[in-house]
Amino acid sequence: MKIRIDAEPTKIFDAITNPLKLSIWFCNKGEVNLKIRGAIRMSGENCAATTFREKEIVGSITELDPNRLIKFTWPINGTQSEVTWQIDEKRNFCDFLVTHDKIPDNSMMMDAWLIYLYNLQSLLHVNRPSYRLDYARLDKGTIRRELFIEALPPAIFKALTDQRDLRVWFSGEAEVDPQVDGKYLTGWKDSAGNPDGSLKIVELVENKKLVYDWRYSGGPSGDLVTWDLLRIGEKTRVTVKHSGFAPETDTKGFTQGWHAYILGLKDFCETRGRMSYTIIDGDWSA
């Protein structure tokens, strides 16, 4: 996948190789020996490696082209995966491309990379990350994600309830009838061809609240997803909650997913309908 970054290649390369910069958007503690076969080590609660057997990234650089590309190994649950970060300079911006190969099953890295890319972009645009995920404290029972969006509630409510908007930032096959008991479909299907994800709207308060039910991969019904919008000045505090999980449920996939979605909503609303990232290839279920 790739994301547009309004910065020069030298600044992007510094952000992806400087341990101090990496600790702001990718990990909490980093070590980089910037040469071929040089060691890379990254760890901390904001590093996705926390959820794998190794608990940290201990890899080495296999390709290096200053201000353009770095490739390194990342062992995941005993499998030697490979990550490539590439900077593609355009006329007035750069595309930053991440490729992650040889990933073991059930690693759930698609959403993780999307979260990372948004935080890297934010660091380079406004000198701070957008919204980091704490992998050491994943939500239990009810998932809750919250951030501020620089747009007013009507624009955000439209993004949540307008079918054309949803097909840009949420799901390309979304179907919506914006009324209580109206359909709210992601377009996803389970192995039997039945609808996955959201099904219908349970509660709707214009410009303030949206609630829909949720059923995933043949699991039990009864989950609820709630979006709350609260205007504060010229911004909106947006909260998404997914309730209904048993206390012992591993929520990593869902927490990552909603974290990525709320960042995607922010991107869509603040760019007035244009998304910064592009998925070139990948499997969301892997």
Image: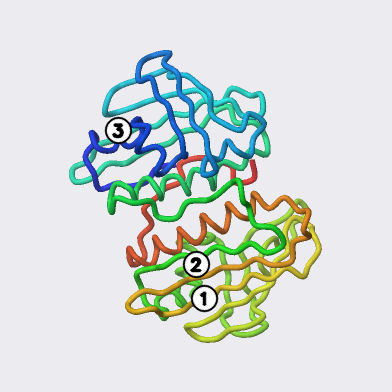
Q: Is residue 248 above or below residue 13?
A: below
Asked if residue 75 lies left or right of residue 279, the reply is: right
Amino acid type at mark 2? Leu
Q: Which residue is mark 3?
A: 13
Which residue is nearer to you in this view: 145 or 83? Answer: 145
Q: Give the alpha-carbon distance from disc 3 to disc 2, as whole Å.
A: 33 Å
Q: What is the secondary structure assignment of the residue under circle 3?
A: helix
Residue at figure coordinates x 61%, y 29% from the top left: 76
Label number found at residue 166? 2
Query: Where's the C terminus, which quadrant?
Result: top right
- Where is residue 64 shown, x and y percent of the image? 35, 20
Is residue 38 or residue 28 the one in the foreground? 28
**Residue 161 image label:** 1
Marks 3 and 2, the one that precedes in the sequence = 3
Foreground disc of the pair 3, 1 = 3
The residue type indicated by label 3 comes to Phe
Q: Residues within 10 Å of mark 1 (few under 14, many from 20)?
A: many
Residue situated in front as seen by the camera: 57 or 185? 57
SS type, badge 2: helix
Check disc 3: other Cα within 10 Å, few if <14, some if 14-19, many if 20+: many
* Label 3, label 1: how far apart the Cα atoms are: 39 Å
| Residue 133 horizontal side relative to residue 236, left or right | right
Q: Are marks 2 and 1 in contact (CB under 8 Å)?
A: yes
**Residue displayed at 56% across by 73% down:** 227
Q: Does label 2 or label 1 sit earlier along the sequence?
A: 1
State the image coordinates of residue 213 (x, y, percent, origin top left): 69, 72
Disc 1 residue type? Thr
At a point 29% along the width and 46% down the height, the residue shown is 124
Extreme residue in the left direction:
91
Q: Quadrant of the N terminus?
A: top left
Q: Quadrant of residue 255?
A: bottom right
